[in-house]
Image: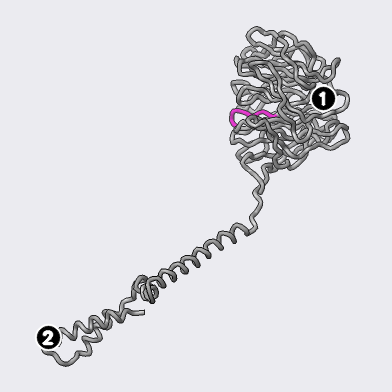
């Protein structure tokens, strides 16, 4: 479209100029030049202005409002259409990663200083005890074999020392023999070397790294004794004994440097509720207030505020009686208080303190018979602020006696375990929990 109004104005001006000079006829060429010069494309405003400038001002305003309303309706429709369009479900909080090179249960998993995870020993769920070890690389999410231990062992402990080496101690070996030997893994070389042996053979005991760099090893089946390992001299020394023999108990380093030992299974007493405190400064034990409920094969987690959360376990020996109950220990007063209950009971579960202060409970066994399959697949989260439990997305596989390791990026690596609690096939698969993932 061309602006012929402008052409007419310029033509009239030219005619007046010619008339003033006494010209009474028109030069066609001049008229053509004026027409061509005036034939520029009109601006958008010049095109829109005639449309808007009709009728009375009130009519023009009403027309403009109608146009704006139509535009807004189209925009709103597009937004609603996008909201109603089917959205893909965001991936579950649990994702399978590559499987270990061997199926394992009763093994250990240790986060190394380089960010990799060392998995060592364990069994196939039957009579084969593995001396092998492997490394998980979070960057590639892959497993590679590393040096094997001198002895196959399950139900042992693995402790990361300050210098980056890993101390493996005790456990059960071939033909069920309880071991007193210990070995050191060197990540730089990927190899194991023997170190001093404990004074007592132990299996299903605990090992705790103390603030001074020593390692406190406690209990085991039929054992009330405790020992200290000194990495500088690679020697073991006995320290005071507990009031009870304990296995499948927990040992937690408190903020004041003492170690809280809770519950466990006693050969003479069965499941116990008692608790004791070890003081590294004096090498002595003192009794602490006992839990409300006896339990063994439970979990204990030091919370960010210094309290200790004890969860699940079996409340009786001989046959499984898993519990869903949880308790909190207050170091300042020594008192125990109820901490709600999980949605389902668990024994042989794995607990992890998450970066946000919550506690993740994964895996475990909820049945009462050895013939029942592992479960539940769903994991649960404890919120220390509200004292409440919530169910998270299910794992990719049900497993009892797994390991759980918090990685540097805030995800949790869960490995291995059994398909049933006793005399059942071991699991080679591994999976990762991402606390940032949710389902719609």
Would residue 178 be found to the left or right of residue 1 on screen?
A: right
Dominant SS in magenta: loop
Q: Is residue 33 visible?
A: yes
Q: Can you say whether 46 is above or below 82 in the image?
A: below
Q: Which mark is residue 315?
A: 1
Give the labeled residue for mark 2. 20
Residue sitting nearer the eye, 267 or 393: 393
Magenta stretch holds residue 203? no
Direction bottom: furthest residue = 25
Direction left: furthest residue = 21
Q: Residue at x 59, y 21 (%)?
A: 163
Part of the protein shown in magenta: 109-116
- The local secondary structure at tag 1 comes to loop
Magenta stretch holds residue 115? yes
Find residue 243 and report its horizontal and vertical position in percent. 77, 10
Q: Can you say whether 407 is above or below 213 in the image?
A: below
Task: Tell me how the rendering is colored.
Answer: one colour
Find residue 270 and report its horizontal and vertical position in percent. 84, 19
């Amino acid at each position: 479209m061309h602006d012929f109004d402008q052409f007419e104005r310029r033509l009239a001006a030219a005619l007046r100029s010619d008339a003033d000079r006494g010209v009474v006829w028109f030069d066609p060429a001049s008229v053509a030049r004026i027409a061509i010069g005036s034939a520029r494309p009109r601006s958008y405003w010049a095109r829109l202005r005639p449309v808007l400038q009709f009728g009375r001002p009130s009519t023009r305003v009403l027309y403009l409002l109608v146009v704006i309303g139509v535009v807004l309706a189209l925009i709103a429709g597009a937004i609603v259409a996008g909201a109603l369009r089917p959205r893909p479900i965001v991936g579950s909080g649990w994702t399978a990663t590559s499987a270990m090179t061997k199926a394992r249960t009763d093994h250990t998993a240790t986060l190394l200083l380089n960010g990799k995870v060392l998995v060592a020993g364990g069994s196939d769920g039957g009579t084969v005890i593995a001396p092998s070890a492997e490394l998980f690389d979070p960057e590639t999410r892959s497993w590679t074999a590393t040096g094997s231990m001198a002895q196959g062992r399950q139900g042992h402990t693995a402790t990361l020392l300050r210098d980056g080496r890993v101390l493996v101690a005790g456990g059960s070996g071939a033909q069920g023999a309880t071991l007193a030997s210990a070995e050191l893994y060197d990540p730089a070389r990927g190899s194991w070397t023997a170190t001093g042996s404990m004074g007592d053979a132990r299996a299903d005991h605990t090992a705790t790294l103390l603030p001074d760099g020593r390692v406190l090893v406690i209990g085991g089946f039929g054992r009330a004794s405790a020992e200290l390992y000194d990495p500088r001299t690679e020697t073991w020394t006995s320290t005071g004994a507990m009031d009870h023999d304990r296995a499948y108990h927990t040992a937690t380093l408190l903020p004041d440097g003492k170690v809280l030992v809770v519950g466990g299974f006693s050969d003479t007493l069965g499941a116990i509720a008692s608790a004791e405190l070890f003081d590294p400064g004096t090498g002595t034990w003192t009794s602490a207030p006992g839990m409300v409920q006896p339990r063994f094969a439970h979990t204990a987690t030091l919370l960010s505020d210094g309290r200790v959360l004890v969860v699940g376990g079996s409340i009786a020996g001989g046959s499984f009686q898993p519990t869903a109950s949880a308790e909190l220990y207050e170091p300042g007063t020594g008192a125990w208080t109820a901490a709600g209950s999980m949605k389902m009971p668990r024994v042989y579960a794995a607990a992890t303190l998450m970066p946000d202060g919550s506690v993740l409970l994964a895996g475990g066994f909820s049945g009462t018979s050895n013939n029942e399959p592992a479960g539940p697949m769903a994991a649960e989260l404890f919120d220390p602020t509200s004292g409440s439990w919530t169910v998270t997305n299910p794992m990719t596989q049900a497993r009892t006696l797994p390991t759980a390791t918090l990685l540097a990026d805030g995800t949790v690596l869960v490995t291995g375990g059994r398909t049933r609690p006793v005399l059942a096939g071991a699991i080679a698969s591994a999976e990762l929990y991402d606390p940032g993932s949710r389902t719609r």
